[in-house]
Image: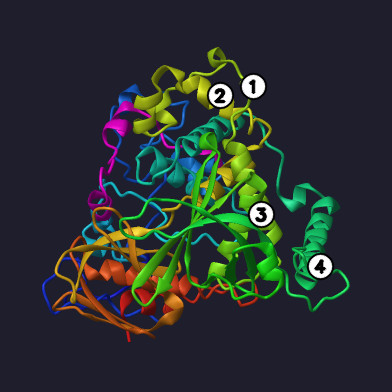
Amino acid sequence: NTFVSGVSPSGSTGSLDMNPPLMCGPPIAKTPRASPISKPAVTPESTWKRQNQNNLNTSTNYSPNGNLSPNSYSYGGELPLSQSPLTNKARNGLIRPKSLMERARMNVAWLDSSLSIMEQGIREFDTLRLRFKFYSFYDLNPKVDSVRINQIYEQAKWQLLNDELDCTEEEALMFAALQVQVQIQANIPQPSLDNSGLGNLGADDDIDAALSELQVTLEGSHVNSSPNDITAVPELYDYLRFFKPKRFTFKAYKRYWFTCRELTLRLYKSQEDANRNVTPLHEISLRGCEVTPDVCLTQHKYGIKLEVPSSEGMSEMYIRCDKEEQYARWMAACKLASKGRSLADSSYDAEVASITAVLQMQRPAPTPAISPSELDIIPEDYMPLRFVKRLKGKLVHRILEAHANVKDLGLVEAKMNYIKAWQSLPDFGITLFIVKFTDQKKDELLGVAYNRLMRMDLNTGDHLKTWRYSTIKAWNINWNAKLMMIQFEEGNVMFGCLSADCKVVHEFIGGYIFLSTRSKESNQMLNEELFHKLTGGWA
């Protein structure tokens, strides 16, 4: 947050609950001015609220939040290692949503990003909860982003422990195992990841990586494409099982011959029919669809849930694979196709490897690598409460069994694996709001993700309709009526937000559209004015 000099216009202070006329915020100052605060907030001489000063040991560093001393903020040396304190007071103060409605109501308290915190009534000694608002983490580099990686890891950890995201038992054990590895590695000196400490080796590694990426980009992925014909379009094919739910029908999968080519799935009765170019029984366009994993390793279930846009909303379809390797290939193909990228895309092989690595981490080892007596593991600090109650006395042993798969990971590598697995969860990055669409009689959920908006059922969370940001033509807000209208290529959508101010929804949509403009090819200079225009509603 930045301080804007001068008096804010009427309605800007506390803009989330002011009566009309309502303005989003003050205009951007053309020239930077000094902050009203005359000195840094975190210094030994500043006004941190200290309690029981007489009992403090003067030889130790004091921190009001239990993590870092004020002095450490000057150079950030300990920030990559800082962890949230797991005290009884912290546990008792956790908010654990028990329903989708409660999860949506948690988003009422976001501050206005177009105003300074002082303009919104935040004063000295007030407590703020800091977290990443937009789930679009661009280009995480372990060499330079160790602080940001640690912050994202902490946010992911607490989101899982607080039951803000659903996950399977195998996934929960994998997250707990990675958390144990992070705790172990945090007490061990780590090798430097900075190029300056690697000499010429680091530079050579960067050059080799760039050359490898260029080679893959030029050659494409190796998925059934003829090595002698660079014009051949890659294709994936195999026997899989398919199910499309209908009313009053049993969930029965049928076996088909699947082909995936140029963002389209085609289902044939047999391989012979495909070879004879018989008209496929089903043809599914994957562009713009929602792809969700449906996996349970203990039951040997490797499923893919597809939600395909149609004129009637979202059509659900399920694909069942027989083996882990088969699932990784088809899941990667579907995920890329949903983003408009074919099997020829250079990231296909990396996507397959990433999916396989996550599955391998979920597979428990025969024996733990560490004895339970060597670590003091409190199950509530590593697993969501619903699994703690279900597994009870077996939990520590199960966590250590899962830990054997990740025992060789370094500190940053363990955190990166945790973040990648978190990002692969079905509900990752979806911010919920309770809304009422003007053409509907009952309240529903609006899910805001990094690339789309979703109309969802309030009780079950089922996706009823999906709109991609790429199809947005414009959006408008009636600040007096608290209504938001979004113009899509297929028509207009109008709704009022019931669980938060419509300004919060507006900021999420504008922020994600702003972040979508980033790419490796374009200039990465931060366009702060564009961000405030998209999130603040300024003309």
Q: Amino acid at mark 1?
A: Ala
Q: Is residue 505 magenta?
A: no
Viewer-nearest residue: 488 or 41: 488
Image quarter where the C terminus lies is bottom left
Left or right placement of residue 244 versus residue 477 in this view: right
Residue 198 locus on image (x, y percent): 79, 48
Identify the disc placed on residue 215: 4
Identify the disc placed on residue 352: 3
Left or right placement of residue 524 versus residue 65 in this view: right
How far is mark 1 from mark 4, CA to CA? 39 Å
Q: Which residues are magenta?
A: 80-104
Residues at badges 4 and 2 in contact (C-beta under 8 Å)? no
What colouring method underlies this structural image?
rainbow
How far is mark 3 from mark 1, CA to CA? 28 Å
Sequence-wise, which precedes: disc 1 or disc 4? 4
Q: Residue at x 35, y 41 (%)?
A: 163
Sequence-wise, which precedes: disc 3 or disc 2? 3
- Seen in the picture, residue 458 relative to 67 is either above or below; the reply is below
Residue 467 locus on image (x, y percent): 39, 74
Sequence-wise, which precedes: disc 1 or disc 2? 1
Sequence-wise, which precedes: disc 4 or disc 3? 4
Q: Amino acid at mark 2?
A: Leu
Residues at badges 3 and 1 in contact (C-beta under 8 Å)? no
How far is mark 4 from mark 3, CA to CA? 18 Å
* Quadrant in which residue 343 is drawn: bottom right
Residue pointed to by mark 1 = 369
Residue pointed to by mark 2 = 400
